Every structure is written in C-alpha cells, then in structure tokens.
Image (spheres, rainbow, N blue to C red):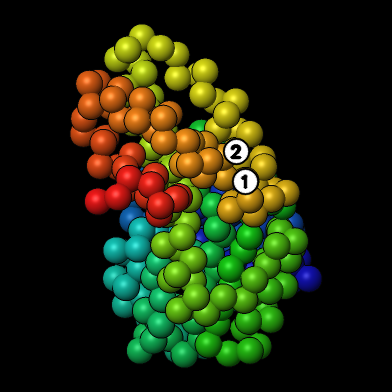
Amino acid sequence: MNEDIKVVLIGAGRIATHLGKVLLGSGVKIKQVYNRSLGAAKRLGETLDCQYINQPTSIDLNADLYIVCVSDQAIESIAAQFSFLDQKDKLIVHTSGATPGKVFEGHFRRYGVFYPLQSFSTEQEVDFQAIPICIDANTQADVQLLQGLATGISPKVYAINDEDRKLLHVAAVFVNNFSNHLSALMDQWLTAEQIPFELLQPLIQMTAQKLEKQSPATAQTGPAIRGDIDTIARHLDVLAEKKPELLPLYKWMTRSINPNLLPE
C-alpha cells in the first residue's frame, strides 16, 4: 500500500513537483524535500506540506525511498553526496530516462530507476493515469516495491532495464523533442510570412490522436508515401525560393518515407 511508503524528494524542479503531488495524492507520505536552493525547497515543501532542507546532513533517515529528481548531469554528484544513506541500507532511485541506474553503483547497495516517460513543464498539469512509468532496481524485492509505488499513480507500469531504457529515451527524443522542433521551425517561417501557425494545430492534434488507434506506419500520409512527385517538386521549388536551408531536411525526410523518391 502506498500509504505505508515514506519518501524523500531530492530536487525541487518540474519532475519533483509533478511527481510529489501525484505521490501525495496516492497516499504516499512525503517526508522531506531537499534542494540546494532553500527557496525552491521551501516552495515545494509548502506545496506538499512537508519539511524542506538544503543541507544533506539534515536528510531524514527514516524514509523508505529517496527519489532523485535532478538533471542528468547532477545525478552522480548527488549519489556521492548522499552515499552515507547506504549505511542505513536505504533505496535510492532517479527519474532519468538517459542515465543508467548503475550510476549509483559503488555508492549504494540498493538502487534503481523510477522514470515517468513524459515531458514536464511548470505551466501544464499532467495526468499520470496516461503516463508510462518505467521502473528498474538491482534486486527483485526493490523492483516489487517500485512497482507497487508506480501502480498507485499509473496503470501503465513497465519493468525496463538500463539498456532498453537508453533506446527508449532516444526514441522519445525523436518523437517529442525533434517533432516539436519541426513545429517551431514552421511557426517561425509562417509567422515571418504573416500566416497564423494555429492553422496547423488541428492537424498536429489529429496526427497524435490517430496514433492511439493506428501504428505510425499505417497512419502515414502525404506526398512521399503516395509517390506524388509533382507535389514534391512544387514543395522543393517553394523551399528553394523561401527557405533553402530546409531543402536537405525535406529531401531526407522524403527519402526516409519513400526510398524510391529523390535519388541522390
């Protein structure tokens, strides 16, 4: 039962905020929030109605789980700072998709990963019922503990090891960060041409909705999949005139969708 689990959050940023709220709502006792900046720790601590600290030596030693919600670059430093918790046989996990759980090896005997596969922002609330939680630990007993914690906030819980999670994170960058960057490029271009980007928003939404019922391959539309070389030629003319820096990207994407088009 989540009501029996006592947690300390290490970090007070976006992931810590969203995760802390949903864990608290599931019955987890949030004992403390630690952050280097006392102001950030205070804001989240008050939100979660728990103690807040900015000194590692003030960490609560009676928690069951310590969740590290910091940048990937800071995880190893945090592991070293809090390695004294290993003397109490404590379980520590991080929330990163790209960093292996083994980053804790040498500092902790019990360690793992609790990775919500979602892009978090301060401004937008998220529904954890729709978010996959990827878990891993170096002992089966701790895998089960993390699974119990995860199922309290999401029905989508997956045991994913370091190697598979590394591949999954690369895929997530492609479908999220890169696709959003394409939208940003189009937003900049259309704005410069005084065309509202909002005209594309229903198309973006429909594309995402289709993937709930179809595979990406069967959902693919557009001139490349149809082999419509005339339309592609017109697009290339527009890009050559208006946005030549996007020509290589358009050609690469077209060839990737249909290798029979646009020979080198």
| Residue to which mark 1 is pinned | 219
- Outermost residue to the right: 1
Residue type at mark 1: give it: Ala
Element under disc 1? helix
Going from N to C along the chain, the mark reached first, 1 or 2, is 2
Residue 14 visible in the snapshot? no
User: In the depicted view, which residue is nearer to us: 11 or 153?
Assistant: 153
Residue type at mark 2: give it: Thr
- Residues packed near mark 1 inside 10 Å, few (<14), some (14 to 19) or many (20 plus): few
| Residue to which mark 2 is pinned | 207
The image shows a total of numbered marks equal to 2
User: Which residue is depicted at the point 50% across and 54% down?
Assistant: 16
Q: Is residue 132 above or below residue 261?
A: below
- Outermost residue to the top: 194
- Residues packed near mark 2 inside 10 Å, few (<14), some (14 to 19) or many (20 plus): some
User: Which residue is depicted at the point 60% across and 25% down?
Assistant: 202
Q: Position of residue 209 (x, y in %)?
A: 66, 40
Q: Is residue 226 above or below residue 7?
A: above
Element under disc 2? helix
Image quadrant containing the N terminus: bottom right
Q: Position of residue 141 (x, y in %)?
A: 65, 88
User: In the depicted view, which residue is nearer to us: 136 or 169?
Assistant: 169
Q: Position of residue 261 (x, y in %)?
A: 38, 47
Q: Position of residue 62 (x, y in %)?
A: 58, 75
User: In the depicted view, which residue is nearer to us: 169 or 225?
Assistant: 225
> Which mark lies nearer to you, 1 or 2?
1
Q: With 118 as the anchor, is 28 left or right in this view? A: right
Residue 182 visible in the snapshot? yes
Q: With 67 as the anchor, is 133 left or right in this view? A: right
User: Which residue is depicted at the point 28% across and 25% down?
Assistant: 237
User: Which residue is depicted at the point 59% across and 51% down?
Assistant: 216
Instruction: Determine contact: label 1, label 2, CB under 8 Å.
Output: yes
